[in-house]
Image (cartoon, rainbow, N blue to C red):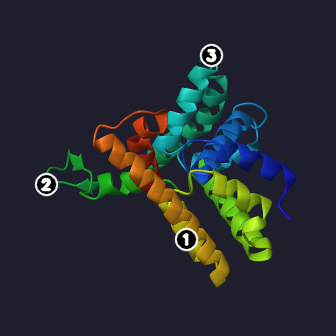
Amino acid sequence: MTDTLFLADFRRAAQSPTCPFCALRDTTTVRYIGSLLTELTLAADIHQRLARSRGFCSAHATTVQALVRQRGGEGGGVATLYSSVLQSVRAELAAGLVEAPLTPTKSRWRRTAPPTLGASLATRLEPQGPCLLCEHAEENDAFALGQLVEDLSEQGGQAPLAQLYQASPGACLPHFQRLLRLSHDEPSVRWLTETQLAKWELLESELEAYRLGRREGSEKKESWERTLAQLSP
């Protein structure tokens, strides 16, 4: 049985012009960022994990920055969270410099760092854990994909989640591959494959119409963007 709240979230995601799993991931990521910047800002475990990961990955840092600006530009939450990241990298770098042995040169008055010092310091600054937002996104992806596969296995194409998925633009290529790998019964695999083939056939016809200059209708005009989103998300 699919969770009611998840079903409501997936219903909204299925109405987006792109892969419903990508849309759902974006929604849950924004929701989690909101929590990180408000009620979780002072959570000790969040600070520890963020320090270990050296902050967010580049892509999610850009997402956080855009979201903060969209909501008025008050970056107090980011400042609080990243204070721990900055303290961590400073401490690691300083400790690495102190712990590195100094090798005497020919002159007794001069010392030079061993040739591996730079590499050693760089290694100390490597992330020691995954980006919090990447980890959260993967957990939500796994749950959402698993729910569809489970519902298909139990109820077939008549499952509420399957009906929502069928009415959506279909999964992007990476998410579709994951759906296939998660599906262990032939009826589910066939249903997913036939549904996807129909989605791609429609998209291909719209893309071909756009390419040949027959661009009436918003679907045809946006077909190249949807093709990019479907095959190279």
Residue tagged by mark 3? 72
Crowding at dot 2, Cα within 10 Å, few <14 / some 14-19 / many 20+, comes out as few
Residue at 63%, 83% (x, y): give it: 186
Residue tagged by mark 2? 106
Crowding at dot 1, Cα within 10 Å, few <14 / some 14-19 / many 20+, comes out as some
User: In this orientation, which residue lies closer to the viewer: 1 or 170?
Assistant: 170
Residue at 86%, 52% (x, y): give it: 4
- Give percent across and percent down for residue 60: 53, 41
Q: Are marks 3 and 1 in contact (CB under 8 Å)?
A: no
SS assignment at label 1: helix
Q: Which label is found at residue 193? A: 1
Q: Residue lying at the far left in this picture: please name it.
A: 106
From the viewer's perspective, tell me whether residue 135 is left or right of residue 232.
right
Q: Quadrant of residue 71?
A: top right
Name which of mark 2 and mark 3 comes first in the sequence.
Answer: 3
Query: What whole-number distance in Å separates the C-alpha atoms at marks 2 and 1?
Result: 71 Å
Tag nearer the camera, 2 or 1: 1
Tag nearer the camera, 2 or 3: 3
Residue at 27%, 42% (x, y): give it: 212
